[in-house]
Amino acid sequence: MNVIKVTPRGFCLGVVKSIKMAKDALKTYPDKKIYMIGLLVHNKIIVKELENMGIIAIDDWKKSRMEIINTIQPGSVVVFSAHGTNKEVIKAAQLRGLICIDTKCEWVLETEELIIKYLSLGYKVIFVGKLNHPETIALSTIDTKNITLVTCVEDVENLNLITKKILATNQTTLSIIDTELIYQAISKKYPFALIKNDICEATYIRQKAIIDLDPNLIDLLYVVGDQRSNNTLKLVEIAQNKNIKTLRIDSKADIDLNDLKNVRNVAVTAGASTSSIVQNQVIKFLEEF
């Protein structure tokens, strides 16, 4: 079987940094309880590994992060996820006496600083993001009065902003295709709006690698990544839109041999929160099949 290794794929630098910071916390605070607020990264295999090392994961969709930190004993360590956390939540955690480790991705931090800058200049902000995604929650709640969340083109049509001072920016892990369509709609409705497309480089180049694939040369594409990873799901979506048969799997264990019948050319890529170990196990299995 011919295995096409799509590059780049797998871990981005932001994920590597976040995991390192979490593991370093175990060394720095060996005698304290360490809590992971939300999933550090959207990959259950990585989260399970951290839990096995002693970090306690709290991922309750029914509670806000503000509510969660109020349940944690003062003096404990809290590790905030790579997707970003509202500064008010971190401030409240510190006032409660919690030791805070913010593993926020640098690209998310850049978007956060951009939003804060333009809010201070009196701008209204249109934030393009996925509903209930932790990054979107963190950035769209910086100022709920002056930031409007948009998730699709239809949302743009329903906007009613009466000002010429508008900034539009976005979640870093969206589809480059979907985002462009939304920005076209924003530009049409508000031609004076400033647009800063903040899809991160890691997301962009991984999606571009899929866009550049020739569907005539691929019988099947495996996207290795977690079902809660937005950048993983977008790789699947983009590939399917190119008429490439695509399957998302968490690991080698998810490969169904029935899917490999009559497959000669199989391609493999991986989301930005998927480790090299997991994706290489998939590649090795396919090469030996």
Image (cartoon, grey):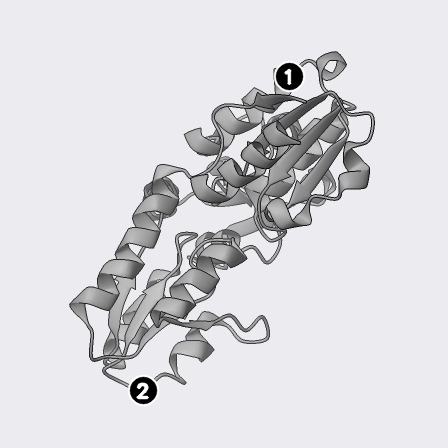
**Looking at the image, which is closer to me, 5 or 70?**
5
Q: Please tell me whether residue 176 is drawn above or below residue 124 in the rendered image.
A: above
Q: Identity of the amino acid at label 2?
A: Gln
Q: At which x and y percent is residue 186?
A: 62, 32
Where does label 1 land, which residue? 213
Q: At which x and y percent is residue 99?
A: 23, 72
Residue located 36% across and 62% down the image: 80
Q: Identity of the amino acid at label 1?
A: Leu
> Tag 2: Cα neighbours inside 10 Å, few (<14), some, or many (≥20)?
few
Q: Which mark, residue 203?
A: none
Using residue 98 as the reference point, say whether residue 158 is left or right of it. right
> Tag 1: Cα neighbours inside 10 Å, few (<14), some, or many (≥20)?
some
Which of the image's four quarters has the N terminus? Answer: top right
Q: Quadrant of residue 33?
A: bottom left
Residue located 64% across and 50% down the image: 253
**Looking at the image, which is closer to me, 172 or 167?**
172
**Looking at the image, which is closer to me, 236 or 133?**
236
Where does label 2 land, which residue? 73
Using residue 24 as the reference point, say whether residue 116 is left or right of it. right
Name which of mark 1 and mark 2 comes first in the sequence: 2
